[in-house]
Image (spheres, grey):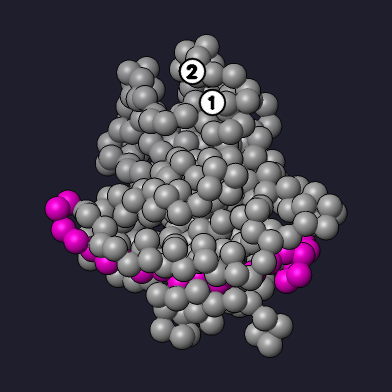
Amino acid sequence: MNIQNTPHPFAVPANETERLVSVRSLLPSELTISDELNILTTLVQDIFQAASCSVTIIDEDWQRIAATSGLKAEDCPREKSGCTHVVFSGQPLIVPDMRLHPAFRQQSYVTGEPGFRFYAGFPLEIDQGLTLGALCVIDTKPRDFDNHQCAEMRSFAQLASALLSLQRKNTLLQSDKVTLRKNALTDPLTQLYNRRALKEHVAPFLRQHTESKQSAGILMLDMDNFKTINDTYGHPAGDRLLKQAADRIRSVISADDIPVRIGGDEFCIILPSVQNDRDLQLIADRMIEAFRLPFKISGQDIFSAVSIGTLLTPQDGSTGEQLSRHADKALYMAKARGRNCAVRFDKSML
């Protein structure tokens, strides 16, 4: 089987929203590891004499581990996972030597410990055509699979899919499709809308708002020094900081406003009732003040102010592409002016 040259960082499948509905039907909050999946990964690792075998689920931004044997796999960002490429293609991926593959050769688990070399991932589905993740075998020495081994892995992947499907049934008894779709459009960390919601929910809303000749405000927020805080205190502290940031955003906006976590420490807020610059600036100023207060993380005061780009639609753009580009320009200017401030978009920034 040939090495597949999949785009990196990760590309998103065309059916990503439907795929996430399938994923969230399995793990609406936390993934429960079943004894049967652990037995399966142990069996596969033993049969193929590999360093590690795992069942992975690829969520919106993260690889989740459903079961693992041998060298223990851990949850990690989606862009670092080989299984992300299996999800994108929906096909098996075999990499005889990760040092020779452009998507893997710079990864820390290849260049450093544990020094992975071989990867084989086979797709998992509980809904036809929607790849959740992969059954993957990883080794610390280069190798390959012959046709017989590939056929065996396909069979084991089908068994893993069946076990995941059984695991989902209990979840489906407690959830309906409306809830599942909401979960697919919700950021699991902050419980704000996620970036998929911009296309699925927010964009149609803005289009209708524009057609009715009504204005709406938009704030594009970026937390200052978040990367430094994340690197200094660790990802768990960064996650707690983001949760508190989401709470502060909710404390400033109204129930009709639409807060979206774009990704990382970047947020977008749609303000349907804002009709003029004065009201837009007022809300931006309140947001700035809210983020000037210290965050409490593990008993420590941590400061992370916010930079904001502001604009009005349709005056400053009527399409999602225009609004995104113009909001980024205003946000960039806020950062250039020293951060911890809000800057209104104007055409001189183009």
14 left or right of 138 in image: right
Residue 64 in the image: x percent, y percent?
A: 41, 39
Q: Is residue 208 above or below residue 105?
A: above
Q: If the image is split into quadrants, where does the C terminus sit?
A: bottom right
Residue 313: within the magenta? Answer: yes
Three-letter code for the amino acid on which mark 2 is drawn: Thr
Three-letter code for the amino acid on which mark 1 is drawn: Ser
Residue nearest the viewer, comparing 155 with 202: 202
Residue 114 in the image: x percent, y percent?
A: 27, 54
- From the image, tell me which residue sits under label 2: 171
The answer to whether residue 81 shows anywhere in this view is no
Q: Is residue 237 above or below residue 111?
A: above
| Residue at 47% over, 29% down | 28
- From the image, tell me which residue sits under label 1: 25
69 left or right of 105 in image: left
The answer to whether residue 244 shows anywhere in this view is yes
| Residue at 14% over, 53% down | 299
Residue 296: within the magenta? Answer: no
Q: Residues within 10 Å of mark 1 (few under 14, many from 20)?
A: many
Specify which label sits upstream in the sequence, 2 or 1: 1
Q: Which residues are magenta?
A: 298-321
Q: In the rendered structure, are the residues bearing label 2 and label 1 in contact, judged by CB atoms less than 8 Å apart?
A: yes
Q: Is residue 62 above or below residue 171?
A: below
Work out how far the residue at label 2 is from the one at label 1, CA to CA, in angstroms.
Answer: 7 Å
Q: Residues within 10 Å of mark 2 (few under 14, many from 20)?
A: some
Residue 157 in the image: x percent, y percent?
A: 52, 28
State the mark number for residue 268: none
Farthest-out residue, front? 278
Residue nearest the viewer, comparing 125 with 240: 240
Farthest-out residue, left? 299
